[in-house]
Image (cartoon, coloured by chain):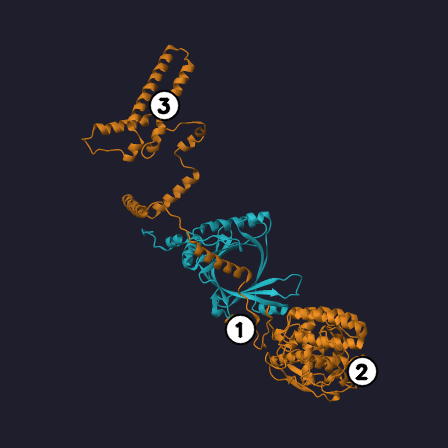
């Protein structure tokens, strides 16, 4: 299971966000470049269509592959009160033959995208990962070198934390309290719930980027 | 009380000795907040009241009289009230420079002794000691005076740092407050920009979460010449052309061809499969024999949309699923009407049609076919004496293997009568597609050919089938598998089948090849099935072509 929230930030404020995250997390950022292939099962494979994502981390010296299956989200009145989305998730490292394997199983490529950005991994009540990335699409199949951003002026911010059914309430609290620190720059919400940009983002970014002393506002 | 007195006298001293020393005035703010005159007056009156009470107590104690408690208590309460008022007044300002009395009440009483004690808590004491040792450790070797000097220097440094920090804070505060003009205005985003951003945001979120806007249409899904580094070795080096369906990408893997096996069971399989195959609802089940030649479908390279033969481009075929549905229905209808012989023919035709559709159809169709084929197979089981031992999966795997890479079409016997000669044709996938297209466009020919085919090889032995040069891709077991049907029969001819799990199409292709002409793939199958099927023996003598 994982707890996840998403938000958007204008590309011009990404640097300020990085400074803020650096201060909050206390770790150095890691570059992120992931080629994500989303495979959907064929029409007659199984009772319901299933979707599997293959992630290839291109930042490593040797590209590493991960397979990820995102399950259904927690539902109910209680889930609606929680400000983060709690959903089942299964992930595993796989070899590079995973793609061929899934093709042979009957999965087909539904879409693919490339995420380029940076990420912070730290521990603050829970093992939290914050990724800020520009989501790129490829006009030609598998052409990751020629990827263009889906939305050039806006980048995606995602805060995730693994959880289990026993401790997810604490993880939810940890994630939501961390998100409050980012309030001056962006709002985070469950995936699918749009937030818009924050009006104070420009001022907050300016103050984060300033050299810190006596600069007129 | 004493403190208040002290404050009052302090002020009085200041006022009485202005010329002697620099006038110490109270801070103007304090002066405003604290009306010192009134406080002094009140303090004086309170002082007088308390001294009066003390005198009374004194008199009572001397007289040894019982004091009137009610009076005493009331006087005491008055004094208490007066004191309380004064303390309230000076509390605001006295915090910074005097200690003012604090009333002891219920909540204070218990904690006061602890707070008043000067001894530290044990933990704090230990902390204190360790810090002190730490501080002095470096200087233990030096004389005391030197230690003192050093400590002083340290204190000075710290003091200087604090001062500079305070200065910076004060400066910044001044600047900040200095430039502020009027009430703060909350920053807002104008509506237009907000709408644009909202739109972008929806795009982004839907792309990330659902993949909207990222799907490429089928014809754009051709792999470019250079794959990125991480995908180069993911896709095998000898991949054939990739086929993608419009709605979903079907990636055809390239697998080494299967080793071929004998063909003995091929015919059997064909027969059984033919009966079960779904296919188009082509009419004329009977082998009205048409001598239409299949020569028009040559093994020329790819003929696509503009080819005269492929009037119906494979890509433009109606939804294969719909087709298969229609075919199924029609097939079932016709089946009821026909004799077993005709049924077989029809089934083969249907099979061929379906295989043609399969040429680039989607997986669903295949699955449908498989399912139905299986059902039909079971029905036919009794008739056919087939051995259908092979599991479907294995068959499909083999079929896939056949379809990949080596496209060796074994061809022989499809030629007229006993004159079939073996030909080993290697068809590239375009050629196969062409055949499919052509096959599709000449249904009537194919139908007629079926019968012709069937009739043409009374003496065909299994061994002739496509077994040239050991390019047998299908093990015999595959052939026995119902689903394999056509593919099995064609053994090597299966190669052109690009899609996975297209057993049908495999057979079709192989058949085409085997005929050496541009026979529809089904032809071969029909032929094979015809050979062994007793029903068709009567038609065998017709050797056309």
User: Are circles 3 and 1 on residues that touch, CB within 8 Å?
Assistant: no
Q: Chain A is which colour?
A: cyan
Q: Position of residue B104 (x, y in %)?
A: 41, 27
Task: Indicate the secondary structure of the residue bearing disc 1.
Answer: helix
Rendered image quadrant of residue B370 = bottom right
Identify the colour of chain B in the image: orange
Q: Which residue is pictured at 56% across the width and 73% down the height?
A: B219
Mark 1, other Cα within 10 Å: few <14 / some 14–19 / many ≥20: few
Q: Disc 2 marks which residue?
A: B537
Looking at the rendered image, the disc whose residue lies closer to the viewer, 1 or 2, is 2
N-terminal-most mark, 2 or 3: 3
Labels 3 and 1: the sequence-earlier one: 3
Which subunit holds the residue at mark 1? B
Q: How far is disc 2 from disc 3 in space, using C-alphas?
A: 130 Å
Q: Quadrant of the C terminus of chain B?
A: bottom right
B292 w.r.t. A191: above or below: below
Q: Is residue A161 left or right of residue B431?
A: left
State the image quarter where residue B276 is shown. Answer: bottom right
10 Å crowding of disc 2: few (<14), some (14-19), many (20+): some
Residue A153 visible (yes or no) = yes
- The residue to which callout 3 is attached is B82
Q: Nearer the viewer, mark 2 or mark 3?
A: 2
Q: Secondary structure at mark 2?
A: helix
Instruction: Please tell me whether mark 3 sits on a helix, a strand or a loop.
Output: helix
From the viewer's perspective, tell me whether residue A68 is left or right of residue A155. right
Q: Which residue is mark 1?
A: B232
Chain under callout 2 = B
Badge 1 and badge 2 in a common chain: yes
Give residue B239's quadrant in the image.
Answer: bottom right
């Amino acid at each position: 299971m994982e707890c996840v929230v998403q938000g958007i930030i204008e590309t011009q404020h990404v640097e300020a966000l990085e400074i803020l995250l650096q201060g909050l997390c206390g770790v150095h950022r890691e570059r992120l470049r992931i080629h994500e292939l989303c495979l959907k099962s064929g029409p007659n494979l199984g009772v319901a269509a299933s979707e599997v994502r293959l992630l290839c981390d291109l930042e490593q010296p040797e590209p590493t592959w991960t397979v990820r299956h995102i399950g259904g989200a927690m539902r109910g009145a209680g889930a609606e009160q929680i400000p983060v989305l709690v959903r089942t998730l299964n992930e595993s490292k796989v070899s590079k033959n995973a793609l061929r394997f899934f093709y042979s199983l009957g999965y087909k490529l539904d879409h693919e995208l490339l995420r380029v950005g940076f990420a912070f991994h730290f521990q603050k009540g829970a093992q939290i990962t914050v990724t800020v990335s520009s989501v790129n699409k490829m006009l030609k199949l598998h052409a990751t070198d020629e990827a263009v951003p889906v939305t050039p002026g806006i980048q995606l911010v995602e805060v995730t934390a693994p959880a289990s059914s026993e401790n997810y309430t604490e993880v939810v609290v940890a994630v939501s309290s961390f998100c409050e620190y980012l309030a001056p720059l962006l709002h985070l919400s469950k995936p699918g719930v749009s937030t818009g940009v924050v009006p104070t983002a420009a001022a907050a970014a300016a103050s984060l980027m300033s050299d810190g002393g006596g600069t007129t506002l | 009380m004493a403190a208040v007195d002290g404050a009052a006298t302090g002020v009085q001293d200041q006022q009485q000795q202005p010329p002697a020393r620099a006038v110490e005035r109270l801070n103007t703010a304090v002066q405003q907040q604290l009306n010192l005159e009134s406080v002094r007056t009140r303090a004086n009156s309170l002082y007088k009241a308390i001294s009066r009470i003390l005198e009374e107590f004194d008199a009572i104690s001397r007289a040894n009289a019982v004091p009137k408690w009610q009076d005493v208590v009331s006087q005491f309460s008055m004094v208490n009230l007066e004191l309380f008022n004064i303390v309230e007044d000076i509390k605001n300002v006295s915090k910074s420079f005097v200690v003012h009395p604090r009333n002891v009440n219920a909540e204070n009483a218990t904690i006061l002794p602890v707070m008043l004690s000067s001894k530290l808590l044990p933990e704090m004491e230990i902390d204190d000691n360790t810090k002190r040792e730490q501080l002095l450790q470096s200087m233990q070797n030096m004389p005391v005076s030197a230690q003192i000097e050093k400590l002083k220097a340290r204190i000075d440094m710290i003091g200087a740092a604090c001062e500079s920090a305070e200065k910076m804070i004060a400066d910044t505060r001044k600047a900040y407050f200095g430039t502020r003009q009027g009430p703060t205005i909350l920053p807002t985003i104008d509506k237009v920009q907000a709408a644009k951003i909202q739109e972008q945001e929806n795009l982004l979120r839907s792309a990330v979460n659902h993949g909207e806007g990222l799907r490429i249409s089928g014809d754009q899904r051709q792999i470019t010449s250079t794959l990125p580094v991480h995908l180069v070795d993911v896709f095998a080096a000898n991949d054939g052309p990739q086929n993608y369906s419009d709605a979903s990408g079907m990636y055809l893997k390239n697998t080494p061809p299967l080793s071929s096996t004998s063909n003995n069971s091929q015919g059997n399989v064909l027969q059984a499969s033919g009966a079960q195959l779904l296919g188009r609802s082509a009419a004329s089940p009977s082998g009205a024999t048409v001598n239409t030649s299949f020569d028009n479908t040559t093994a020329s390279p790819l003929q696509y949309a503009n080819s005269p033969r492929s009037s119906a481009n494979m890509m433009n075929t109606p939804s294969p699923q719909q087709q298969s549905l229609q075919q199924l229905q029609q097939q079932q209808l016709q089946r009821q009407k026909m004799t077993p012989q005709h049924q077989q023919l029809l089934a083969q035709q249907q099979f061929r049609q379906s295989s043609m559709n399969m040429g680039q159809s989607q997986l669903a169709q295949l699955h449908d076919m498989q399912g139905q084929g299986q059902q039909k197979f079971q029905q036919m089981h009794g008739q056919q004496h087939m051995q259908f031992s092979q599991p479907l999966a294995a068959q499909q795997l083999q079929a896939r293997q056949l379809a990949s890479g080596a496209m060796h079409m074994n061809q022989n016997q499809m030629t007229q009568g006993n004159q079939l000669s073996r030909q080993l044709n290697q068809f590239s996938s375009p050629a196969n597609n062409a055949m499919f297209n052509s096959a599709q466009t000449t249904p009537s020919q194919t139908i007629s050919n079926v019968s012709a085919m069937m009739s043409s090889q009374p003496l065909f032995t299994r061994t002739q089938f496509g077994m040239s040069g050991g390019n047998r891709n299908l093990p015999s077991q595959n052939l026995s598998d119902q689903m394999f049907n056509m593919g099995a029969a064609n053994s090597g001819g299966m190669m052109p089948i690009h899609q996975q799990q297209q057993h049908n199409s495999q057979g079709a292709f192989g058949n085409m090849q085997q005929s050496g002409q541009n026979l529809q793939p089904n032809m071969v199958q029909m032929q094979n099935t015809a050979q062994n099927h007793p029903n068709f023996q009567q038609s065998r003598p017709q050797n056309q072509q």
